[in-house]
Image (cartoon, rainbow, N blue to C red):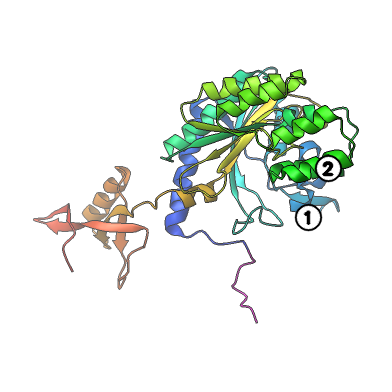
Amino acid sequence: MSSAWVLPDHLADVLPSEARQIEELRRLFLDCARSYGYELVIPPLLEHLESLLSGTGSRLDLQTFKLVDQLSGRTLGVRPDTTPQVARIDAHLLNRAGVCRLCYCGPVLHTLPDRPFATREPLQLGAELFGHGGLEADLEVLELALSGLAAVACRDVQVDFGDARVLRGLLGGLNLTQDQTFSIRQALANKDEQKVVSLAHAFALPEQTREALKALVHLYGDASVVQEGIRVLAAWPEVVEALNELLWLSAHLSVKVSFDLADSKGYSYYSGARFAIYVQGGSDALVRGGRYDEVGAVFGRARAAVGFSLDLKALVEVLPKHPRKAAIKAPWGEDAALREAISQLRLSGESVICALPAQVQMPDEFECDRELVLEKGVWSVVKLRAA
């Protein structure tokens, strides 16, 4: 029989040292976003289900926990993603003309983990830029994401580019069903050339499209694959334009870049260039983002939009563990001079831990390397004496 204290699968407590590191990462990222002019918003954890699953949110239906509101009787959802909420805020509550930059950080909840060993309660941090359809906005969001990773000392950063317009352009006007399109997407994602060719014949696709899809399987790697894509996909001007935009974006970055023109992750979500950022020690992309224009259309205000998000819990796993914070051990007492000395040390930024009567063990998060002692009638900080 399972214990009542055992948490559900893929949910876990965050213990002191890791919790402190996550909080420090949150502050660094949000301060970085603020330096770019992004304003912080805090959407609610619960919303009416139809609002959460509107537009781009519809893809998250199976990932959404649902419950009944005891006040209204309506069905509520626990947010699985914050982006649709931020789009609602931009469209309805702020309703600003021109560019609007917003950032956020808060927990989301998934019915199922999105990959093996992942948590079902990510701490999602992200930034969204609304109201500008140019590449300048895409580049700003990318630079913000990279600046945040640099601020938290991530190493060996690599940006992998793709674009939703590539596959949409190749399949546009062919009257394929959603299931047929999904099958082609999966075969391309698996780099299964034989399956792609088989599906293209089964769906009676034009020969030119069949050859393009076959070529797409192999178009991943460095910038040379984009040049090759421009050559072999020249019959689709909108695709060539998208590929040239990827080259423009990548040319402005100082980190390693790669491209996967067959990758269609977030196909139904993104409308243009998309990116995934990998760092040393991570087995999967740490940051995902890109352009998703018209995200606010379902809220009555169609807007150009581009942004990114990441899970701070996943981020902390790829960073070195912080050393324990240095602290000062102090005796507990009612002496006014002692209490004043402790107060002044704390005001100066020091962590001072008072040893309560009979207390033996100190907190795991702190390393008491000094102590407050009374010397010649004055409370002074000295190096901790050996026990």
User: Left or right: where does residue 209 sit relative to residue 99?
Assistant: right
Viewer-proximal residue among 326 and 358: 326
- In the figure, 371 relative to 273: above or below? below
The residue lying at 69 percent from left, 37 percent from top is 217
Q: Residues within 10 Å of mark 1 (few under 14, many from 20)?
A: some
Q: Which residue is mark 2?
A: 199
What residue is drawn where x is 67% and y is 19%? 132
Whole-percent x and y of residue 265? 69, 40
Determine the main secondary structure of the stretch shown in magenta: loop
Asked where in the image residue 54 lies, by quadrant, the reply is: top right
Q: Residue at x 70, y 29 (%)?
A: 90
The label shown at residue 8 is none
Q: Earlier in the sequence, mark 2 or mark 1?
A: 1
Identify the element where label 2 is drawn. Answer: helix
| Position of 139 relative to 175 (above/below) | above
Would you call the spot at circle 2 few (<14 residues within 10 Å), some (14-19), or many (20 or more)? some
Q: Position of residue 146 (x, y in %)?
A: 50, 32
- Quick check: can you spot residue 299? no
Q: Position of residue 182 (x, y in %)?
A: 80, 43
In the rendered structure, which amino acid carries the disc numbered 1? Lys
Q: CA distance from mark 2 to mark 1?
A: 37 Å
Q: Where residue 327 sits: x, y (%)?
A: 29, 54
What segment is highlighted magenta in the picture?
1-9
Direction from residue 303 to residue 368 in the image, left or right:
left
Q: Is residue 40 magenta?
A: no
Identify the amino acid type marked 2: Leu
Q: What residue is at 46 percent from the left and 26 percent from the top?
A: 254
